[in-house]
Image (spheres, rainbow, N blue to C red):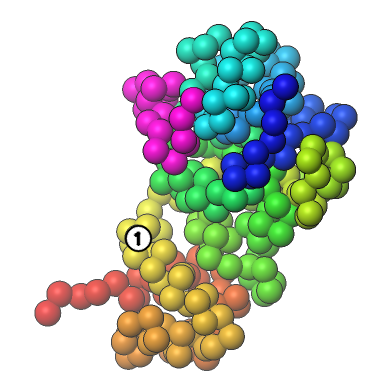
Amino acid sequence: MVRAKKHLGQHFLTGPGIADRIAQSITCHNGCNSVLEVGPGTGALTLPLLERGDLDLHVVELDTESVDFLVTEELLPSERVHGVDLLSWNPNLAFPDNKPFIVAGNFPYNISSQILFQVIDWRERVPELVGMFQKEVAQRIAEGPGSRTYGILSVLLQTYYDIEYLFTVDEDAFEPPPRVKSGVIRLLRNDMVDPGCTFLHLKRVVKGAFNQRRKTLRNALTSAGFAEEVIPEEFLKKRAEQLSPKEFHILAIALIPTSS
């Protein structure tokens, strides 16, 4: 019997039909059928992924007890079960030669933002993500401009992905039940290759804008170290939550440092 471990943020999915629904939400975008499941636990989602019959599945699981369970129960061959931390793992170990892969999972809530930033780093290899997050996080990612939950991750992910909030999952669908509802979302890679600046620069601008989201961009960005005179006039009196990802790209390009 595998015990859910609080320090790993584990909440095992037990609700009937939910794992099937998540598995069937994978579209194999851009013809990709390789899937990396993150945090399979006791295999609630692993089984319906395998039952689809059209997916080349590998899993990453940090919990050694879950790894032993998956291998002992023969859900997957041992070479497809990677007992490692996703955030320090090389995906070429499962998908060599920079092969693209879909990311799926009932993601541990305590590292969900880190997983999403990792997906952004892998954006040229990850055409699709389907997974479950804390509902508030899932909504934030999918929200558009003007919402109070629209934020840093919304802008950065929507730069490279089209995002859809699929459905909500109640607390009693897990063991142990979390204290919050969960939400399942789908990310599909869009055509963005280069927003006109490096990702690190875009991230710095977006973080600077949202770190003081109640202030105008004039005040927020100057506090973040950007010179007021290079901020385009049309953005000076706006707040971060009013800008679309495309407008953030325009703003970030304007704020690219120039050599003297």
Q: Which quadrant of the figure has residue 196? A: bottom left
Q: Position of residue 88 (x, y in %)?
A: 39, 38
Query: In terms of depth relative to the viewer, which is nearer, 158 or 213?
Result: 213
Lateral position of residue 201 relative to residue 180, left or right = left
Q: Main secondary structure of the magenta part?
A: loop
Lateral position of residue 134 relative to residue 15, left or right = left
Instruction: Confirm whether residue 32 shows in the render.
Output: no
Say whether residue 57 is magenta.
no
Residue name at image x 63 percent, y 68 percent: 150
Q: Is residue 191 above or below residue 238?
A: above
Instruction: Confirm whether residue 2 shows in the render.
Output: yes
Q: Position of residue 185 (x, y in %)?
A: 69, 46
Extreme-left residue of the structure: 260
Q: Position of residue 216 (x, y in %)?
A: 52, 88
Q: Is residue 179 above or below residue 41?
A: below
Residue name at image x 78 percent, y 55 percent: 180
Residue name at image x 46 percent, y 70 percent: 206
- Circle 1 residue: 200
- Callout 1 crowding tier (Cα within 10 Å): few <14, some 14–19, many ≥20: few
Q: Is residue 171 above or below residue 199?
A: above
Q: Which quadrant of the figure has residue 73? A: top right
Q: Position of residue 18 (x, y in %)?
A: 82, 33
Q: Secondary structure at mark 1?
A: helix
Q: Is residue 4 above or below residue 115?
A: above
Q: Report the magenta residues as a range.
A: 83-99
Work out which quarter of the rendered image holds the C terminus and state it: bottom left
Query: In terms of depth relative to the viewer, which is nearer, 236 or 105?
Result: 105
Query: In terms of depth relative to the viewer, which is nearer, 110 or 53?
Result: 110
Residue name at image x 62 percent, y 10 percent: 72
